[in-house]
Amino acid sequence: MKNKFRLFAASLFAFPTAVVSMTFLPSAVEAQPVQGFYITGAGGASFNQDQVVRLNPNMPGGRDKYKTGATAIGSFGYGLGNGFRVEIEGNYRNNALKYQNLSAYRARGDGSQQTYGFMANALFDMDIGNPYIFPYFGAGIGYGWSTMNGVKLHTADNRLTEHLGGTYGNFSYQGIGGLSFPTPWVVGLSFITEYRFWTMLGPQSHTADVWGTEGGYNTTHAYSYARGNRDTTTYFNHSVMLGLRYEFNPAPPPSLPNTPQTVAPIMANNRTYLVFFDWDRYDLTQRARNIVQEAAKAYNNVQNTRIEADGYTDNSAAHNDIRGERYNLALSLKRAKTIKDELIRNGVPASNIDIHGYGATRPLVATGLNTRESQNRRVEIILH
């Protein structure tokens, strides 16, 4: 037991150390600022490792083998806006018992082991420079319960018939790694794919009724009945899941400071291309890709020294003026990054591309407040 607590403590110590070291990585890996409250729901496959059954005076020992089962989690969390977030999670796992390997033979299993509980998790999101994918990792501690639901073990020759029942609870901990994929059509909604390693401290003890000739300490005796506790000393679960996360108050990725910036006036010999976007979107239509391709071709043909992509939005925004301004600045920068990626695909060196996001400033068409104007949702590609 002491060794298990040492391992548990070491894993908790290692997690914040890894997080701190991540914050000092080069600027290419930055925090994705999930900000405010969010909810997550996910489900998938549950894989139990073999569980070691401890010998005792009444019950034979061995290993329990489980079938692939199902797992589901739901969580409610809060993002701190700097890449870190915390959450409370409820979880459920269900794995059917396949068989138990005893000392010299195998007992077939029926029924299932169900575990459920709650966790307190700390996670860190990363921005790797791609607006469509964000890795994250984390760890959690909590409490869980294990229930044997209709579990029965029996051999064909009636050497052993064992019925298990009851619920056992203990502290638990887990490690988390995943990827989130923000959806461009619903702001704040992300698809997630995730792996979790979850374990409960043991040994787990359940009530057992045993009939047969197989006895405790893997000995045999005359056919008889015994009742006692059956202990499993290990419980390790691996889960692979898909799900959704929704942020109630989505914040933009790190962007340029929200201050006016001075841009050199466009000279007469500069060439400008305009790419327009749908409302609240930063993906490219085929027409937009054709325009970017033309700009890249012109850049490569005349050997310009620099190419600039300036992103803009209209002045429509949700929430209030301050948050709307921040959101529009981030959206305009995403549009500029999308153009940069497309220019690179068309042969323009990344080091020669400058990008800026100016939000709703400098509109092509003057409008009233909170107005959707298609000509203001644009990126200006300027060849210098």
Image (cartoon, grey):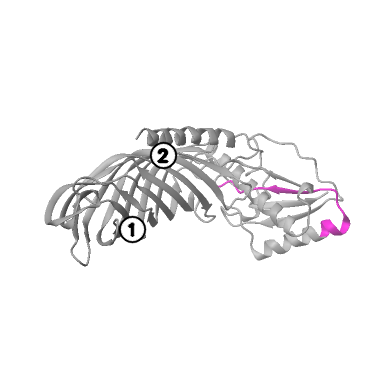
Rendering coords of residue 245 (x, y %): 44, 49
Residue identifier under label 1:
66
SS for dot 1? strand
Residue 28 occupies which quadrant of the picture? top right
Q: Residues within 10 Å of mark 2 (few under 14, many from 20)?
A: many
Amino acid type of the residue tagged 2 in the rendering: Gly
Q: Residue drawn at (81%, 46%), measured in percent from left and top?
A: 266
Between 102 and 264, which is closer to the camera in this rendering?
102
Amino acid type of the residue tagged 1 in the rendering: Tyr
SS for dot 2? strand
Rendering coords of residue 239 (x, y %): 41, 53
Label 2 vs 1, first from the N-terminus: 1
Residue 38 occupies which quadrant of the picture? top left
Asked whether 37 falls inside the magenta stretch, the response is no
User: Does 102 sit left or right of 207 as displayed?
Assistant: right
What are the residue bounds of the magenta stretch? 298-316
Residue 140: give its label. Answer: 2
